[in-house]
Image (cartoon, grey):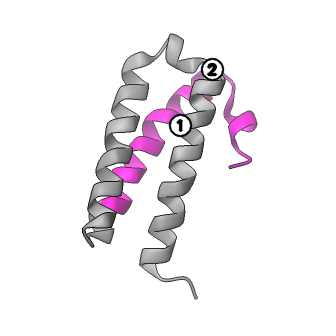
Amino acid sequence: MVSQKERTEKDIQKLWRIIKEFKRLRLHDNYPQILEWATNYANDAQFFFDHGDVFSAFGAANYAYGFIDAILVIEGKKDEANSF
């Protein structure tokens, strides 16, 4: 069974890959604020994780996912990024 810490760590790593894909798809050209917010939440998630607060790290990562996911859906790019 995967621990909460392991799951959160994997989710944060996945989040950084999705942010990278967001940039590769050039979605940040039209949604720079979304990229900024998602990146800020991803940084927060990493900070919380590094300081042992797995619960807050998971929550911050999910906020970031929400921002990015919404734009992927709006832009019809969800399937392209789903491989992460």
Report crowding for label 2: few under 14, some 14 to 19, many 20 or more residues within 10 A (C-alpha).
Answer: few
Kind of residue at disc 1: Ile
Quadrant hosting residue 81: top right
The residue beneath circle 2 is 75
Kindly state the secondary structure of the residue where label 1 is placed. helix
Kindly state the secondary structure of the residue where label 2 is placed. loop
Q: Is residue 4 above or below residue 38?
A: below
Q: CA distance from mark 2 to mark 1?
A: 15 Å
**Residue 58, percent from left and from top:** 38, 61
Most common secondary structure along the magenta stretch: helix
Report crowding for label 1: few under 14, some 14 to 19, many 20 or more residues within 10 A (C-alpha).
Answer: many
Q: Residue at x 30, y 68 (%)?
A: 55
Kind of residue at disc 2: Glu
Q: Which residues are magenta?
A: 57-84
**Residue 42, percent from left and from top:** 38, 46
| Label annotation for residue 37 | none
